[in-house]
Structure formats: C-alpha cells, structure tokens
Amino acid sequence: MISDIVAIIRDYWLLLLIGQYPNGPLGGLAATLMLSVLAIAFAFPVSIALALARLSKSPFLNWPVTALVYFTRGVPLLMLILWGYFLVPLVTGANVPAFLTMLVTLVVYQGAFLSEVVRGGIVALGHGQMEAARALGHSYLGAMRYVILPQALYNVIPSIISVFVATIKDTTLGYVINVPDLTFAASQINNQLLTQPFQVFFILAAVYYVICWSLSRVAVLTERRITRRRAGTAPQPTAKSLKLAALTDQPS
Amino acid sequence: MTSFDLSEILGNPEYVSMLVLGIEMTFIVAIGSWLLAMTLALLLLGLRYAPGPAGNAFVTAYVSYHRNVPTLVQLMLWYFGIFTLMPEGLTFWLNDHNAEATFAVIGLGLCQAAYFSEDLRSGMRAVSPGQMEAARALGHGYVSAMRYVMLPQGVRNALPALINHSVSLFKNSSLAVAIGVAELTYAVKEIENLSFRTFESYLLVTVLYLVFSLMIMAGGAYIARKADPMRSGRA
C-alpha cells in the first residue's frame, strides 16, 4: 500500500504539481493555489464595498447586498458554478476558460461571505470609535478609511485566513466544470491507473490536508497574537461571536 | 434564443417527476447525514470530556482531518477509494442498496460531525465553570450535572452555529452529484440536457434550494428564540 503511494507520487508528481503545463493549461496544485489567491485578492475589495453598503442606512445600498448575502448563504456553491458556466460566456460573448468562470464564481461567493466577516469586525468595534472620529472632524468615509477599517480589518485577519482556507477547499468544486486543478489531476491519474483509486485519492486528501492545516495553524497563531495585543479588551466568546465564527468556518 | 417560459418545464410531467425525485433524494441525503452527524458529534463531545488524554487526542485528529480536507475529496475517497477496499459481500450488498447515496450520507455525516462537535464544544466552553460547581454542590453527580445543567446551556449557546452548519450541510448535499447520487443538482442537469431550457431549469432549482435553506434558517431562528430563557420568561 505505502509502496504504491510512493510509486504514484514518483511517477506523477509533475502532473499533480503543474498539470499538463507547458503542453496545456496550468493545472494541478499550482492552479489550485493560483485560483484561491486570485479569488481572495479580488474578493477582498469587493467584500469591503459590500460590507459598507450593508451597513449603510440607504435602502438602495442595503437591500440588494443583504439579498446577495442571503442568496449565497442559501444556494449551494455547485449551483452558482453551474450558473457561472452558463452566464459568463453568455455575458462576455467569448469562449471563456473554465478557470476564469470558476474565478468569477468564487469572487462573488467568497466576497459575500467575507463581507459578513468585515461587517462583523466593524460592528464589534462599537459606536465609540466612529463617534470620536466624527467629533474630531472626520467625514463618515474619512472616519471609515482612517479609523474604523484599519482596526476592524486587523482584528478579523484570522477570519480572513479561514475564508482563504475555505476558498482552497471550494476550488475542488471546479471539478464539475473541468477546471484543471489538483482534484482534476488526481482523477486523471485515477483514470490512467484504474486499479488504485484509494491510493490516488489518499494522496489528494493528504496534499489538501497539509496545505489547509498549515494555514489554519497560521490563523490560530495570528488570533492569539492579536488577542495578546488587544489584551484586556478582548471580548469573551458570546452567542453573537460564536454565530460569526460559524459563518466563516464553513465546510466545503 | 427562445423566450423565457417556465411552463416548458413545469408543464411537462416527466420533468416534474424528475424534480420531485431529486428533492426527495436531496432530503434523504441531507436528513440522513444530519442525524448521523449529530449522533457522532455528541459522542465526540463526550470523548472530549472523557478522562485521560487519548479521547481528546482522537477527537482533535478527527476534527482536524475533516475540517482541512475538502468535503468533495472526502466523498471521493469514500466512494472511489474505501468502497473498493471493502469485502466483496459488502460491496454487492451496497450496490443493491444505492451505494452512492449510502456513501454520500456517510461522507457528509462524518465530515459534518466534526463541525457540529466543535460548535457544541465552543457552546459548552461559554458556560461558566461556576455552573458545574454549583450543580455539584447541590448534589448532582457529574453525569447528571452535565445532563441537566451544562448541556442545556451549552447547546443553547451553540444553537446559532449549529443552525448555520445545518444550512451548509443541506447545501453540501449537492456535492453528492459528483459521486452520482440522483439528487436535485443531478436532476437539474438532466432536465437541462433534455429540455435545452438552461435558464429556466437553473432558476427553478436555485429558487428551490434558496427556499429550503431560508426555511431551515427561519426554523432555526424560531427554535433559538423559544430556547432563549430571557424571552420565554423561564429564567
């Protein structure tokens, strides 16, 4: 069993790492990581905009974003990917690679989740900060930019890392529209070998485990560091904070 | 491009019956794995509190694996991997009894149990230790104090998280399509293939998922409100 696993890694490590590249699109682990990093990089500014819109008093900003958040919380990502697969080429009118479709879908999906994280960070700061900043002559947006967001975003760094881990796990769903990622590479290997499915998928699970476990550790350590720096002001877990934690920590 | 027409799907008895079967299978997978997950989660929670380091270490490893490996990969490992290693008699029996759905329930249930048990543990940790001491001082045994004093409060604290994760379990039942379970997402792909009505069929199933998820959220919020002693005036 173990020798089988070693043999598979020896024969197929390049396919697992970069897919068919340079003879085809970039795939394997490299594509998985690139997809996740790009998705979070684009989702981050989107999420701040969504969070500010959801906190705004104007119903024209507030309602559509609330609807979007409930929509992404209530509809399976798989269904959104199918929508993306159907809509993105229809809107752009071009033959779009599956990688790009998946990226757009992930930005929308994780953007909505991340916006709840950012909103939670802003709300957790309390009214005092905003009132003090306004009293000192900042405008609403100025206070957000220079006083509220720097503190709120710093406090939610661990949750942002959790969302990043969730994104890495979510990229596996690209499998249904043939995004050439790590899962796709593993199932290609499985189709070639045919006789060792357990060994192949065991390797796949192990690779994901190592990556996501390391990042989760980073999140835990960052959280400890932040709690220490905020010593004395760090709130005890409450029903509300548990609810937020559950939102950022989604199985996928 | 043909114009938007939902009756093309809802007026066709064949498609409607595919939808109904899909909904049925989605609920079988979701409810089956929820029950499995909740049972396991309570067992894992018990192991956490068991004397000695072994139980705690086991639960930590269990939770770590199920949280850091994508659910889809876990399902694939079960269905494509572990299934083939099982003894032949069991394989035949499972193939006769919808092996895909069985493994979807096992895979999703085991995965979700890790999340549920962590929710319960955070909920329990938010209960002040004084509660336990007070219960013991009043003559409760350890188990009885757990049962009547700690758990009710812990579960109540964990309710919002449990509800969120129940919704995500329901959503994740769609992953079962990857191992060939004929649930709602499978049905929509079939209907789309047969009818060429992509927009209508996706819209219909998206609305169905959304309505069921919102119903779970609303039901959960109702239970959380009922369980809140500050509101129901039992405290």
Image (cartoon, coloured by chain):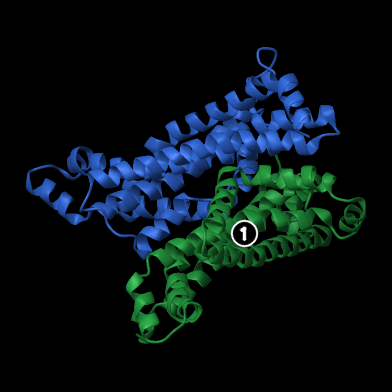
Chain colours: A blue, B green
Name the residue nearer the viewer: A7 or B35.
Answer: A7
Q: Quadrant of the N terminus of chain A?
A: top right
Quarter of the image where one finds residue A19: top right
Which residue bears the numbered disc 1? B170
Tell me: residue A156, above or below residue A26. below
| Residue B68 image offset from top left, x and y in percent | 56, 43
Quarter of the image where one finds residue A93: top right
Tell me: residue B189, above or below residue B23. above
Name the residue nearer the viewer: B64 or A22.
Answer: B64
| Residue B199 image offset from top left, x and y in percent | 66, 46
Q: How many marks?
A: 1
Name the residue nearer the viewer: A142 or A10.
Answer: A10
Q: Residue furthest left?
A: A136
Q: Does residue B96 appear anywhere in the picture?
A: yes
Q: Residue at point 45% right, 43% down?
A: A162
Q: Residue at point 52% right, 60% down?
A: B52
Q: Residue furthest front?
A: B52
Q: Residue at point 35% right, 76% down?
A: B133
Amino acid type, callout 1: Phe
Q: Does residue A156 appear anywhere in the picture?
A: no
Crowding at dot 1, Cα within 10 Å, few <14 / some 14-19 / many 20+, comes out as many
Name the residue nearer the viewer: B52 or B144.
Answer: B52
Q: Is residue A141 left or right of residue B129?
A: left
In what element is the residue under mark 1? helix
Q: Is residue A167 left or right of residue A128?
A: right
Q: Is residue A199 left or right of residue A244?
A: right
Instruction: Identify the subunit bearing mark 1.
Output: B
Tell me: residue A203, above or below residue A61. above
| Residue B8 image offset from top left, x and y in percent | 75, 55
